[in-house]
Amino acid sequence: MTTDVTPELTEAIQRGYDQRDRANMAPTIAYFQALLAEHPDHPVLVYEVGGAYDTAGQEQTARGYYERALALGLDGDVLRRCLCQYASTLKWLGELDESLAVLDRARREFPDSDSVRVFRALTLNDAQRPDEAVAELLTVVTGHAEVTDLGRWAVGLRGLAQWLADGRPE
C-alpha cells in the first residue's frame, strides 16, 4: 500500500474541497467515497472521507475513518491534521481524556504546531481546565508577537502562560 499522494491525486482532493458546500456535505462525502473506491485503503483518502463526515457533523462516523487512516499510516502534515481533527471529534463526542491523549501525541510529534496547541486549548477548556487552556492560547499568541501589537508585553504574557500551566504556584 502506498501513502504517496501523486500530483493527480492532489488535484482530485483539491477538486473535492473546491466543490464543497458546508451546508450540504452529502455530495462531498460521495465524491471522496468514490475517490477512495478508486484507491482502496489509501490512508490520505481515508482521512479525507473522515474529514467530510466530520464537517457534516457526523462525528461518530468520522471517528472510524480517522482511526482507520491512522492505523494505515500517515506522516508529515497530513498526520498532524488528522490528529487535530480526530482529537476535535473525540472532544465533540465527550471523550475529553482520549482527545487530550491524541493531542499529547500530536504535541510530541509536532512540538512547534500552533494548530495542535489551539485544539488542545479547546479540549482543555471543555475539560474544565481553563487556566491550562488560556496558557496554551497565550503560548500561541506570544509566539507570534511580531505580528501583533503585544510588543513588550509578550515576555510577561509568556511568563503568565507558564504560571497558569504550572497551576498558579505561589
Image (spheres, grey):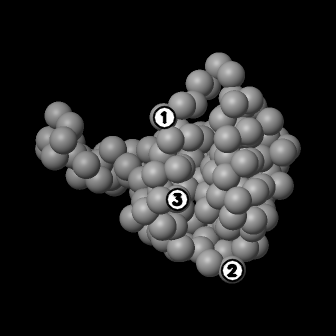
Q: What's the residue at 47%, 59% (across, down)?
A: 8
Which residue matches tag 2?
1
Residue type at mark 1 is Asp
Say which label, 1 or 2, has the lower sequence index.
Answer: 2
Q: Nearer the viewer, residue 41 or 81?
A: 41
Say which label, 2 or 3, has the lower sequence index.
Answer: 2
> As drawn, is 35 to the left or to the right of 159?
right
> As drawn, is 49 to the left or to the right of 106?
right
Which residue matches tag 1?
18
- Marks 1/3: CA–CA distance: 14 Å
Which residue matches tag 3?
9
Camera sees residue 45: yes
Camera sees residue 92: no
Residue type at mark 3 is Leu
Badge 2 density bin: few <14, some 14–19, many ≥20, Cα 10 Å: few
Question: Looking at the picture, how far across and down is residue 130, in whole percent?
Answer: 59, 40
Question: Looking at the picture, how far across and down is residue 40, in whole percent?
Answer: 75, 65
Q: What's the residue at 34%, 54% (across, down)?
A: 159
* Numbered disc 2: secondary structure: loop
Question: Looking at the picture, how far across and down is residue 141, in whole percent?
Answer: 33, 44
- Marks 1/2: CA–CA distance: 27 Å
